[in-house]
Amino acid sequence: MRFNTKAAVKIVMLGAGGTGAHIAPHLYRLLYSVERPVRVIIADGDAVEEKNLVRQNFAFADIGVNKARVIAERYASAFKLEAEYIPDFIENAERLRELVTPLEYRVPRNDWRDKYERETVILIGAVDNNKSRRLCHEVFMCARDLVYIDSGNGEFSGQVVCGVRRGGRTMSKPVGLLYPDVLTETDKFPSELSCTEASVSAPQAITANLTAATAVVDLLYNILVVGENRVESVTFSTKSVNVQPKLKAVKRAA
């Protein structure tokens, strides 16, 4: 599937923890290198805790500070981009729709006719709960144009899925259609967890977060720089050091 390599870009990333914090430095570096208007908005309602230092991309000086703020300010300033962040969990469909709605902008032309293009919007789901994935899925399925990259992993394995909506049609399936079990509402939004529940998390290895982050950045590079992406999803295992992509079939003329 081909993408416009000249259009303005807006990336909304939900989650700045295990995987999101590792995506961020490469994301800002990538956007620094493209020659077009770019925006990154990172949303996360968590503050950095000492236990996060084991596998998340934070340092002791970050403890007590909002994760989205740390990541946005650190890497935006490093690459001379504007730091935009939301120090809250996005748990409302209307708010998420507003964030991923593309803006239209005028493209200068040599003749008298005005030309307008839509910015390319990419939603990155770096969340650790299926209720948030369900929210992203619902917003994606109603969007006219949207790229939705979801990352999920356990201790040693996981998957990254790239869904694409174009002209109101689903061109590549999102995580909710490839893995329908994630749409089963068996958990809670982060803001709904009690202190005890929030302190308990499934074990994850830093290698799984790093592998997932790398796959997300690979997809972003294909879309933003190469202008073509055939990878619908990626599954991986850090124990066997194996990454397996699923490619979109290419239709050939008869």
Image (spheres, rainbow, N blue to C red):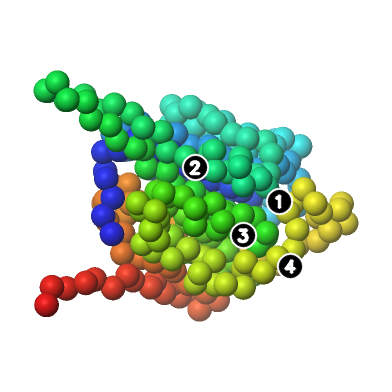
x and y, in percent, of residue 119 in the image: 36, 38
Amino acid identity at mark 1: Asn
- For marks 3 and 1, give the CA distance: 25 Å
- For marks 3 and 4, give the CA distance: 11 Å
x and y, in percent, of residue 3 in the image: 28, 50
Q: Is residue 249 at least partly visible in the picture?
A: yes
- For marks 1 and 4, give the CA distance: 25 Å
Given residues 122 and 61, the one toward you in this image is 122
Label number found at residue 186: 4
x and y, in percent, of residue 189 in the image: 73, 54
Q: Is residue 174 above or below residue 198?
A: below
Q: Is residue 241 above or below residue 168?
A: below
Residue 74 is drawn in which quadrant? top right
Mark 3 Cα-neighbour bin, 10 Å: few <14, some 14–19, many ≥20: some
Amino acid identity at mark 2: Val
Amino acid identity at mark 3: Arg
Mark 4 Cα-neighbour bin, 10 Å: few <14, some 14–19, many ≥20: few
Q: Is residue 91 above or below residue 155?
A: above
The disc, 1 or 4, on the residue closer to the chain's N-terminal end is 1
Amino acid identity at mark 4: Thr
Q: Which residue is mark 2?
A: 100
* Front label number (1 vs 4): 4
The disc, 3 or 4, on the residue closer to the chain's N-terminal end is 3
